[in-house]
Amino acid sequence: MKKIIVRLYRDSLLRNSVYLMLTTGAMAVFGFFFWLICARLFSPDEIGVATSLISAMTLIADISILGFDSTFVRLLPSAKNKNELINTGFAVAAITATTLSVGYIVALPYLTPLLDIVRRNFFYAAGFAAITVITAANALAGNVFIAFRNAKYNFINDGCVNGTVKVCLPFFVAGMGAYGIFAASGIAAFSAMAAGFAFLAVKFGYKPQLRIDTAVWRNVFRYSFSNYIANIFIIAPALVMPLIVISQLGASAAGYYYMSFMIANLLYAVSHSVSQSLFAEGSHDGSSLKKLLARAALIVGAITIPAGAAMAIAGPLILQFFGKSYGIAGASIIALLALAAPAIGAAYLGITALRIMKKTKMLVAASFVYFLAVSGSGIIFAGRGLAWVAASWIAGGLLSSLVSLSSIIFDRYRGAAK
């Protein structure tokens, strides 16, 4: 048994997948208690506003990364100027996040009037911008660890430090209403970012500088930009859906949807973790992509299929912990979201394979199909109820994976023909 465990641990694809799953699991456990506490301290309307505010901030932060998360994983292993590449990514993200945050705050009355509490208070506005920058920097630090195949630091920073700080804060911000929930999540992100930068400096010799290296920027621009566009399409549905729900169905419905998605996202995180580990492994040894992809698919299927069925049954009972109304309103939502897990997994693995192969045009195409199917269906059918919003994830995963698989098969066939 000891030899088997040692052998499995030496398998870096499995090891880093497990660490990333543990990270997500720890974040989910701490997040569960965080939202459980918030459900007792805040009203559904306040939670709906807070979750929409967090979604908007996270979307801006992810957009601000400009594809450097994928660039780090794909290019850092072979980069000679690692320090310059990392600093360029951090600097670009910080500048972009600040600019987009200010623009979003100014446009709030026209975009989402319910979130205008941020614009009306200078300190709230400044906090929104600062938390956006922190979130972007923390996400990039996590991708540096993935690129170096040391995902254990993701578990320490995002899983343990972030979660521990977050779960302790709601009692201290209860008087701030919806913005208090948002501030608590931001303070937790700052603690994880600080720990991440400390590990990068001590363990990997990173020397931080807020500086953009123009030579590095020119070399990585094309790949980064393609991944930037693809990443926007991939992350947008999860972050846009609460905004669609709150606009068409109200703040309470947004709260019910967010709680259901937060639990179901545990299953999606399995696929995301394995695909990130696959990305790192393929970037170090691209010649073994076929075998790596098969092993990754086996891991994803072995976990998401039985776990998705179990969550579809037990999900409504879990939602009862947040309150009876959450269990009743979210029963069909969480069941459909759970059943979508294998399809989402196939989409993630297909898109990751395209990243490794540097097939940037098809990467953008597959990601766009994913976005269009999920978000488009949400916009069209949200008025019919939350179950329709949840069902759109199944369509998005299946259609995107079909595009990716078709491109990979065609590429292999063309290569064999030559």
Image: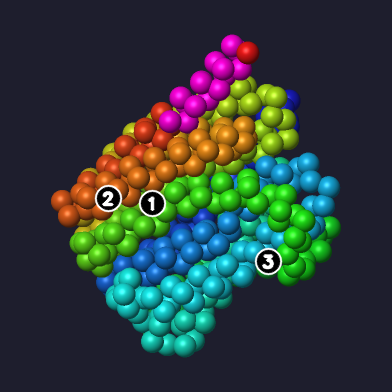
Q: Which stretch is magenta?
A: 403-417
Q: Which residue is mark 3?
A: 91
Residue 394 x/y as whole percent = 32, 37
Query: Are the residues flagged by discs 1 and 3 in contact, CB closer than 8 Å?
Result: no
Q: Is residue 232 visible?
A: yes
Point out which mark residue 378 bears.
2
- At horizontal 66% and vertical 39% (from top left) the residue drawn is 280
167 in relation to 114, above or below: above
The mark total stands at: 3
Amino acid type, residue under disc 2 in the picture: Gly
Q: Which residue is mark 1?
A: 237
Looking at the image, the residue that sits furthest to the top is 417
Residue 65 x/y as whole percent = 58, 59
Q: Label 2, secondary structure: give it.
A: helix
Amino acid type, residue under disc 3 in the picture: Ala
Residue 152 x/y as whole percent = 68, 48
- At horizontal 76% and vertical 42% (from top left) the residue drawn is 77
Q: CA distance from mark 2 to mark 1?
A: 9 Å
Residue 33 x/y as whole percent = 43, 61
Amino acid type, residue under disc 1 in the picture: Pro
Q: Label 1, secondary structure: give it.
A: helix
Of callouts 2 and 1, the N-terminal one: 1
Q: CA distance from mark 1 to mark 3?
A: 27 Å
Tell me the crowding category of disc 2: few under 14, some 14 to 19, or many 20 or more residues within 10 angstroms, Cα based.
many
- At horizontal 53% and vertical 25% (from top left) the residue drawn is 408
